[in-house]
Amino acid sequence: MIELTEGQKAPDFNAKDQTGKNISLSDFSGKNVILYFYPKDDTPGCTAEACSFRDNYQSLLNEGFEVLGVSTDDEKSHQKFITKYNLPFSLIADTDKKIVEAYGVWVEKNMYGKKYMGVARKTFIIDKNGLIRKIIDKIDTKNSSTQVLDAIK
């Protein structure tokens, strides 16, 4: 499994967002990016996390950051999630799991004694040069945007 570290170049990717538009990390060259990985659209923890980013979106923009969410859900699922919660940022459909694997967040999980593969909740703060400035892996879903704001100050 890949283990990315702070100071490393963030892996580029190319995938579709909720509208079917191709999106790559390199599209944001010269900008700071909050790239957050979450397990599933419209589940309680993932909704709390997305809404935290939504509620502090303007503050994050003011700090010079763009927000991108990534899960293995498809474009249609992302579109419904965005519409339902009025999310102002793009969600990337990583249906082939290339991005989650490149970032080392496709991991074995264990629920009720059953092992399965899934997305680990993790946030990468990427600077204008495409370097990973900070990795947050202990996510407080209700306060995820505050965690990011604290980390970038």
Image: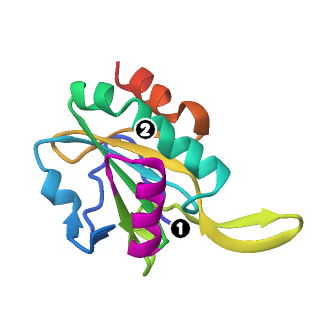
Q: Does the magenta-highlighted stretch encompass residue 78?
A: yes
Q: Residue at x 21, y 48 (%)?
A: 130
Q: Which amino acid does label 2 sit on?
A: Phe
Gap in Å between the C-alphas at discs 2 and 1? 28 Å
Q: Position of residue 68 (x, y in %)?
A: 34, 51
Label 2 sits on residue: 53
- Magenta-highlighted residues: 74-90
Residue for point 54% across, 61% down: 41
Q: In which quarter of the image is residue 53?
A: top left
Q: Which residue extends farthest right?
A: 113
- Residues under numbered marks 2 and 1 in contact, where contact means CB atoms less than 8 Å apart: no
Q: In front: mark 2 or mark 1? A: 2
Q: Is tag 2's residue or tag 1's residue first in the polypeptide sequence? A: 1
Q: Is the magenta stretch mostly helix, strand or loop?
A: helix
Q: Is 10 drawn above or below residue 76 in the view shown?
A: above
Tell me: 110 left or right of 58: right
Residue 45: within the magenta?
no
Q: In which quarter of the image is the C terminus?
A: top left
Q: Name the residue under label 1.
A: 1
SS type, badge 2:
helix
Residue lying at the far top of the rendered structure:
153
**Vertical placement of residue 61 versus 132, above or below:** above
**18 vs 36, nearest the viewer:** 18
Residue, x 58% and y 42% (percent of image)?
48
